Structures are given as C-alpha cells and as structure tokens.
C-alpha cells in the first residue's frame, strides 16, 4: 500500500478530487423544534421540584399512601428521556436531520458522539481546562494546538473541552490529514464530528461562516515523535494557518495540552511495517504490540488543556496574508507561546497520573 498522502495545510490550492464531500442532506422537519420539546438524549434532564411533598420525605395529605411526589418526578424524568430517545431514533430512521456541506451532523454529535467521549474526558483522563474565556462567544477563530500521543486523542479531548466548558457551548471543527478520510469507519465518524481536510480552502470557508476551527500544525511529526522528545514542539510548517487567519481577520488562539504525551509512550517505530500498511509510522510502546489488543488501551494520565490569549489578525491589511516575513513572525510567536505554556504546566504538574 502506498504511503498516505498528506495535503499540507499551508497549500492554498484546491483539494480537487482528493477527498469528496458528502452530499448535503436536509430533513423536512425542524430538528431544533423537536429537541426543544423532547429534551436532549445525551444529557440527564434535571428532575422537577417535589410538589406537594415534605422535605423529610413524608406523605402529603393530598397524596395516597403509595404516591410520593419524588417518585412521580423520577417517573416523569424517565418518560422524558425515553420520549427523547424515541424521537431521536425516529428522525434518524426517517432521515429528518441536517448534515452540512462538510458532512457535519450536529444532532448526532451532541446526542451520541459527545456522550461517548465524555466519560473518557471526565473519568479517565480527568481533563482540567484553563483559559476557556479566551475563546470568543461567537464569530470565527482559529485554535492552534500542540499534537502528541501516538493516536490523535488530544484533538477529540479538545473538542469535548470546548463544547462542554465554553459558556456558549461552541463546536470545534478540527482540520485533519487525508489519512483520516480514507480509513473505513473512522472516515464517517470524523465527518459526523465536524472534522474536515486540513487545507486552506476548507479552513477559510469555515472561518467565513463564523465557525471555531482547530488545527495542529505539527501533524504526523508531532503525534509520531519518540517519547524521548515529549513536549518538544516540532516544526510548524510554512505558516499556512497564519495566512488563513489573516485572510479572514480571525484571531489565533494558542492551545497547550499536557498529558497526551504519556498515554502511549512511543519507544520505537517499525518503519518497514509502516510502509507496508501505508501509515506514516507504526508505534512500538511498552505494551503494544506485545500485549495484543490490551496494549492499545491508553494509560490513564491526568490532562490539562490551556487556551492562551488570542492573537488578533484583523488589524493587518489584506496584502499581509502574502507577506512571508509577517507569516514567519506570527507563526514563531504562536509556537513560542505554546511551548512556553507547556513548560509552565509541566513545572506545575505534581504527577503524570494524579
């Protein structure tokens, strides 16, 4: 199998036929209206207040001996969740849901995919988020983060952090290498989650639509680096993400992620096997492939994700996007800010796992 082709993010050419976008699909009904009535399946709805009952749980005079208001509240909450689940299944079976031009399915993401990722985020990696207030409540913005961990779990955890911790509940649209979109199953899930190809064309369209876009400029160089080089940022390319932000006047938000480097300590790289499989690298860790499927379980490290202060780009003239010196300086500024924050978080960290 040939090596996976990675389209550089800083290449302004059109993608052509590298990856085809799925056709836009619209439902006949109003999805948000249905959700507003039935509630969200992925979230546990708060139980209504106990009406007519006493605080100590005693039976009210207006109720029978077997009818407590708390039981009625629990029954009502269960009924709402069942109704929401049935309504969700009905919309999926009848096709009454929306998918945008990139294949992003907001309802499926909110109701199912985020609910699957959330236990990993909250219970397994116990992610701590800092600086969430630096992400604007609306409008386009570009989040630039370090990339590590052998498998790209850091991008998924960053998505959950933005969605769950931001007051506006914003959705992060990640830019990914084309390898993601040729893998079966992974391709469909990535599209549904709002991921798209890491090229300037798609990034500019999303920013122009007021979306929050995430990019990890290190690419495979960062995620596939050996454990001995952990938390040392790799090259950020030629500054394509800066050029895109300048064209749209979108702020650049540096993001530093600590904890992902240790989930799969990469102590070796089977390059021959990687070439045969068409992968950029084939990791060898203390547990994989020696323990088989068990070796693919990540270590339960403690994570910290910090969003830095935005770097504005709307004050530059239109021709600034073509200035190589300006792009180099801004790229270096973003990289240095991420690296400095990584070192600061590592000094503050007391343990990898606790």
Image (cartoon, rainbow, N blue to C red):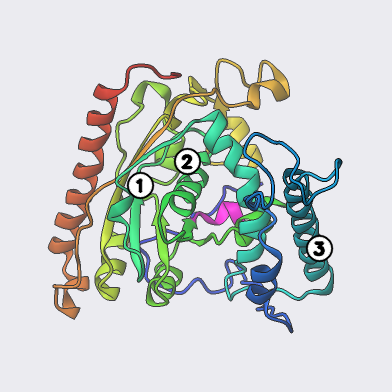
In the rendered view, does 333 fall on the left or right side of 64?
left
In magenta stretch: residue 181: yes
Label at residue 154 = 2
In the rendered view, tell whether residue 224 sits above or below residue 263.
Answer: below
Label at residue 145 = 1
Per the image, label 1 sits on a secondary structure element best described as: strand
Foreground: disc 1 or disc 3: 3
Tell me residue 127's x, y (percent).
45, 35
CB contact under 8 Å: marks 1 and 3 = no
Tell me residue 106's x, y (percent).
60, 65
Q: Toward the viewer: 185 or 30?
A: 30
Q: Residue at x 66, y 16 (%)?
A: 290
Per the image, label 3 sits on a secondary structure element best described as: helix
* Label tally: 3
In magenta stretch: residue 281: no
How far is disc 1 from disc 2 in space, using C-alphas? Answer: 9 Å
Earlier in the chain: of badge 1 and badge 2, it is: 1
Work out whether residue 31 can be spotted.
Answer: yes
Foreground: disc 3 or disc 2: 3
Per the image, label 2 sits on a secondary structure element best described as: helix
Q: Which residues are magenta?
A: 176-184
Q: Residue at x 45, y 47 (%)?
A: 161
In the rendered view, does 124 fall on the left or right side of 77?
left
Work out whether residue 238 can be spotted.
Answer: no
Tell me residue 270's x, y (percent).
56, 27
* Residue where numbered disc 3 is placed: 89
In the rendered view, tell whether residue 45 sits above or below residue 302.
Answer: below
How far is disc 1 from disc 3 in space, using C-alphas? Answer: 36 Å
Within-10-Å neighbours for mark 1: few <14, some 14–19, many 20+: many
Q: Residue at x 76, y 64 (%)?
A: 88
In the rendered view, does 188 fall on the left or right side of 274?
right
Which quadrant, please, contains the C terminus?
top left
């Amino acid at each position: 199998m040939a090596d996976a082709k990675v389209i550089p993010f800083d290449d302004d050419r059109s993608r052509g036929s590298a990856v085809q976008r799925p056709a836009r699909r619209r439902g006949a009904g109003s999805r948000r209206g249905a959700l507003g009535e039935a509630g969200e399946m992925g979230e546990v709805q708060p139980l209504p207040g106990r009406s007519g009952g006493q605080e100590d749980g005693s039976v009210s005079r207006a109720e029978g001996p077997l009818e407590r208001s708390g039981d009625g509240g629990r029954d009502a909450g269960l009924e709402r969740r069942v109704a929401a689940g049935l309504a969700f299944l009905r919309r999926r079976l009848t096709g009454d849901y929306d998918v945008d031009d990139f294949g992003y399915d907001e309802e499926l993401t909110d109701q199912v995919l985020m609910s699957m990722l959330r236990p990993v985020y909250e219970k397994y990696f116990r992610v701590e988020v800092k600086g969430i207030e630096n992400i604007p409540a609306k409008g386009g913005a570009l989040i630039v983060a370090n990339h590590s961990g052998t498998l790209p779990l850091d991008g998924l955890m960053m998505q959950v952090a933005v969605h769950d911790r931001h007051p506006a509940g914003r959705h992060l649209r990640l830019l990914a290498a084309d390898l993601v979109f040729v893998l079966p199953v992974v391709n469909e899930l990535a599209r549904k989650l709002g991921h798209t190809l890491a090229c300037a064309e798609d990034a500019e369209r999303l920013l122009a639509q007021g979306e929050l876009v995430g990019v990890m400029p290190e690419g495979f160089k960062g995620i596939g680096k050996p454990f001995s080089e952990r938390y040392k940022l790799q090259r950020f390319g030629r500054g394509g993400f800066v050029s895109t932000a300048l064209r749209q006047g979108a702020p650049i938000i540096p993001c530093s992620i600590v904890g992902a480097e240790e989930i799969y300590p990469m102590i070796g790289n089977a390059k021959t096997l990687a070439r045969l499989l068409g992968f950029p690298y084939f990791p060898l860790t203390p547990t994989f492939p020696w323990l088989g499927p068990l070796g693919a379980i990540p270590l339960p490290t403690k994570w910290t994700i910090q969003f830095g202060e935005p770097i504005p780009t709307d004050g530059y003239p239109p021709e600034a996007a073509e200035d190589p010196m300006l792009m180099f300086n801004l790229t270096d500024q973003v990289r240095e800010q991420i690296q400095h924050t990584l070192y600061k978080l590592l000094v503050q960290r007391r343990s990898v796992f606790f």
